[in-house]
Amino acid sequence: MTLSSLSAVFGEPMAWRYFAWLLEGFAVTVVLSAATCASASLLGAVLCSLKASKHRVLALPVRTMISALRNTPLLVQLFFWYFGISAFLPSAVMQWLNTPHTLDLHIVSLSFPGFEAIAAFFALTLYAGSYIAEELQAGINQVDKRQEETARALGFNRFQCFRLIILPQAIIFAWMPITGQYLNTIKNTSLAMAIGVAELSYASRQVETETFLTFQAFGVATVLYIVAVCLTEAAASRLHSKRMMRTSLPATAGSGT
Amino acid sequence: MNKFFAATLMVLASFGSAHADRLDDIKKAGVLKVAAFDANPPFGYVDAASKQIVGLDVDYAKILAEKLGVKLEIKPTNPANRIPLLVSGSVDLVLANFTITEERAKQVDFSIPYFASGQQFLAKKGTLSSPDQLNTLRIGADKGTVNEIVLRRDFPKATIVSYDDTPFAFTALRNGNVQAITQDGPKLIGLLANVPDKENYEIPAFSISNDYIGVGIPKGEARLKDLVDKTLLELEDNGTAAKIYDAWFGPKTTQPLARIFKIGDKI
């Protein structure tokens, strides 16, 4: 197929400048997703252990929070953190958040992200974190209870038992569902365009507005999302099989659900 | 299809009035037929009390008829019919918030502009007074609008945050997420009219791009166009244009908007 017949089917090729816009948007998507996945994993582990706590004062609020976060639309949560909370913050804080801050490190200068990105990061972390907490819980439930009893009998305290015996196995059991949450996070960042985060979907819409090249703009964005999701999935399953080899768990562990 | 229709009408019209001069025809008939909007306040709309079409455009039409010494006949139109009505000879002039564009100027002539609707800004009082400041501010825009494109093109250093619609952008302004929002002046005025604490906001008296509104005139009617242009300039000189503006956008109206554009600013 020649180039001219290609453009007859798909329309004009897009100018490089617009590719650059899309790539900038993609960079924001990647950074936001990575930061969210990292902090959501930590949050998930913390929430999961608090939820399992014997003290009801700790467990009950955490359970309520997880259930609220899992059962409301993410878009509403984004609006809540961006529009809702900012109405209550003191105006001095809002002003600081909304003025650009740059940290000059001689070699590179780091710029503090805008309030849109912070609100999106916060909302996405809470949302993904509460799902990951539940996935981890499910993983823990799959570990045989007798292992805990044996460990305690051998002199491990509760924390050691959890960290050294239960958690490593629970992570393996929960790994694939957690990967699913990472992939969801990548896709969910697109909702952040509603609060003005200039990520990939926002950029594709901007390119579409300016060029009217609808198919090309959204087509390129789709391909970039697929690339991000596929690479993440491949990396996650590679990591999983490495872990599996280091343990003596049956080969089927963790591949379920 | 519309273009084809208009072109056909143009051919038909040229048979009928190949040599006649429209200005003489109007005077002979004693009637000036003008197309105006009937549902686009404050430019042209049906007044609830009098059941007559009134508005800023109609005020100008009345004065043009007076100048010609003939009666005025208003014909209601919608945006799509404006060019066909003119080309077919059904009306003599169009005064219906008719934005001057190159594309339209191929089919009809335009007078000099008598109104401009520009891209303006809404900000908290005291934050914005001139376009130079835009490059240092965070500005909210509506996603997918020409406003967003113009702002990005002409003020590349401004931080633009685009929202799904104007109410969202306005909420962001209220919360302090952005320092100003941008839209067409008349739209911002409409938005501000419904805000409970409107005394805290202002629309600074400058615009960064303009849509110019002119009188639509049949193609090639030089004498008619000349008369319309001269009349419009006179109205600016003797203060009538300012009075008409004030009647619809002045401080005593529900939607006051500072008058930035004067007739003759752009020919």
Image: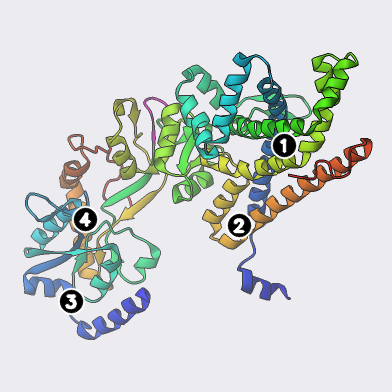
Task: Identify residue for label 3.
Answer: B21
Q: Position of residue B2 (x, y in %)?
A: 35, 74
Q: Residue, x 37% and y 76% (percent of image)?
A: B1
Q: Of the residues tagged 1 and 2, which is closer to the observer? A: 1
Residue stretch in magenta: B122-127
Mark 2 falls on what kind of element? helix
Inter-mark Cα distance, 4 to 2: 37 Å
Mark 2 belongs to chain: A
Amino acid type assigned to the residue bearing label 4 in the image: Ala
Examine the rendering and report whether any part of residue A223 can be seen: yes
Count residues near mark 2 (Cα–Cα under 10 Å), then give few for <14, some for 14-19, many for 20+: many
Question: What is the crowding at mark 4: few (fewer than 14 residues within 10 Å), some, or many (at least 20)?
Answer: some
As for residue A179 lying within the magenta part, the answer is: no
Query: Which of pointers 3 and 4 lies earlier in the amino acid sequence?
Result: 3
**SS label for mark 4:** strand
Mark pair 4, 1: CA separation: 52 Å
Q: Residue B238: x percent and y percent?
A: 15, 46
- Residue A11 spot, x, y in % from top left: 60, 68
Q: Mark 1 — residue?
A: A34
Which amino acid does the dot numbered 3 rest on? Asp
Residue pictured at 52% horizontal, 29% vertical: A81
Question: The disc labelled 2 sits on which kind of residue?
Answer: Ala
Q: Residue at x 49, y 34 (%)?
A: A79
Instruction: Check disc 1 and give the amino acid type.
Output: Ala
* Image quadrant containing the N terminus of chain A: bottom right
Q: Which residue is mark 4?
A: B39
Write down the residue under mark 2. A217
Q: Is residue A199 visible?
A: no
Q: Single out the mark in the foreground, 3 or 1.
A: 1
The quadrant holding residue B57 is: bottom left
Q: Is residue B218 left or right of residue B161?
A: left
Q: Is residue B123 covered in magenta? A: yes
